[in-house]
Amino acid sequence: ARDKFHPQKKEINEMLEKLFRQIKEAGYVPDTNFALQNVAKEEQEHILCGHSERQAIAFGLLNTSPGTPLRIIKNLRVCGDCHSAMKYISNIAEREIVMRDANRFHRFRDGLCSCGDYW
């Protein structure tokens, strides 16, 4: 997160912005309760887009073939907002997203998660 030296930084950020616009159009509402900084609401939404799992998704979408499942391993629990965003992204990008967090595996496909939103 916040890596300013990655060679694909610009493309990853552009992909994050594109995904954010697309999922908002599809009905996603950011849950800014997961942005713990005391800043304006728009800035909180921007902070949520910078979470590492979203950056990993953007990187995966840029560097894998369409239809390829994306696999992410996280050493912390995924936040509720990212969990919600992943459901929308899996539907919009038409990708299966498998994410292992500190508690369980999540398999996002067609806008749903295998955990049944019990995480």
Image: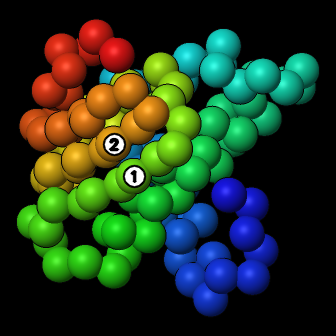
* Residue displayed at 39% across by 52% down: 73
In the rendering, at what x and y percent does residue 92 appear? 22, 46
User: Which one is earlier in the sequence, the residue at label 2 or at label 1?
Assistant: 1
Residue, disc 1 = 73
**Element marked by disc 1:** strand
In the rendering, at what x and y percent does residue 66 appear? 15, 72
Is the Cβ of the residue at disc 2 closer than 8 Å to that at disc 1? yes
Amino acid type indicated by mark 2:
Arg
Amino acid type indicated by mark 1:
Ile
Looking at the picture, tell me which residue is in the foreground, 84 or 21. 84
Quadrant of the frame with the N terminus = bottom right
Residue 77 visible: yes
Residue 100 bears which disc, if any? 2
Relative height, residue 96 to residue 9 (above, below): above
Q: Image check: 89 left or right of 14? A: left
In the rendering, at what x and y percent does residue 2 appear? 74, 60
**Element marked by disc 2:** strand
* Residue displayed at 33% across by 80% down: 63
Q: Image check: 50 left or right of 104? A: right
In the rendering, at what x and y percent does residue 34 appear? 64, 20
Q: Image check: 114 left or right of 2? A: left
Residue 49 visible: no
Q: Quadrant of residue 7?
A: bottom right
